[in-house]
Amino acid sequence: MTLSKLQIKSITNLRLKKYRNLENKFLVEGEKAVRDGLNSGYDYELILATQEYLDKNPHTLKGNQKAEIIKNNDFQKIIDTVNPQGIAAIFKKPGQKKDWTNNLNSELIVCLENVSDPGNVGTIIRNCDWFGIKDIILSNTCADVYNPKTIRSSVGSLFHANIFFSSNLINDLNILKNKEYKILSATLGGKSVFNYKTGEKTIIILGNEANGISKNILSFSDDFITIPKIGNAESLNVANASAVILGELTK
């Protein structure tokens, strides 16, 4: 079956947040990300592949009733990458329970406050996956986790994580604090992460690229850590910093 112009436009619209929210679904491009999504608990609506991709991978979609072959130029319209791999899929957004804070029991949880760059959010999710951290909290001011750039930067790790969206971060952190979680903020004036020992259930807060963590969250925090500066760089990218911090906290 050939996709109509209306169907192609509808899929292309998923590159925009308002349509992802309206349709409650999102688009994933790339072989690994699609494969990880199909192997996860996420529901999917449709798989799209070019004939060129299928010629190289003849068994990938064999027998799949939700797969469609799409022309190269139509595929290029719906994907915002320069050199697409020729396969994409539409996934449905998972629901979230209102009392999601009651389901968190991990020893280490990552919380992002106002991390605005989709690439940074995706890379941090990937770093969490590398260090075995499953639970990630995002404030409602973070970049959209279903943004194509976020998904691309996570390289499929989005499907390995439990993502929780907080509409009131202080309130949700307070609930978790009452569950004996320690709130640990990453700031320039904190203790050296290389000498830091948690020894208890911890939520590590990572803040905005330009402004760091808000004053409200800082005043609510139990402790502070930093990556000591040795050279002359003014700052460290939050995604790069997350890899160092998570590597130390999970040792």
Image (cartoon, grey):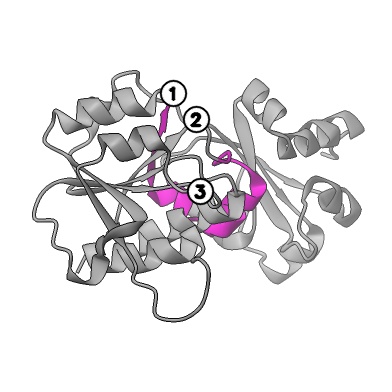
Task: Looking at the image, tell me whether mark 3 or mark 1 is earlier in sequence order.
Answer: 3
Between residues 34 and 246, which one lies in front from this camera angle? 246
Report if the CB atoms under discs 3 and 1 are less than 8 Å apart: no
**Image position of 166 with respect to 8: above or below:** above
Residue bounds of the magenta highlight: 143-166
Task: Looking at the image, tell me whether mark 3 or mark 2 is earlier in sequence order.
Answer: 3
Quarter of the picture holding the C terminus: bottom left
How would you rate the neighbour count of disc 1 (Cα within 10 Å): few for under 14, some for 14-19, many for 20 or more?
few
Residue ID at (73%, 40%): 15
Q: Which residue is mark 2?
A: 140
Q: Which residue is mark 1?
A: 167
How would you rate the neighbour count of disc 2 (Cα within 10 Å): few for under 14, some for 14-19, many for 20 or more?
some
Residue 176, how many percent across, how many down? 21, 31
Q: Which residue is mark 3?
A: 37
Three-letter amino acid code of the residue under disc 3: Gly
Closer mark to the observer between disc 3 and disc 2: 2
Question: From mark 3 to mark 2, how far is it between C-alphas?
Answer: 24 Å
Task: Looking at the image, tell me whether mark 2 or mark 1 is earlier in sequence order.
Answer: 2
Report if the CB atoms under discs 2 and 1 are less than 8 Å apart: yes
Residue ID at (22%, 64%): 250
Residue 211, how many percent across, how many down? 51, 47
As drawn, which residue projects farthest toward the top?
98
Quarter of the picture holding the N terminus: top right
Residue ID at (37%, 29%): 169
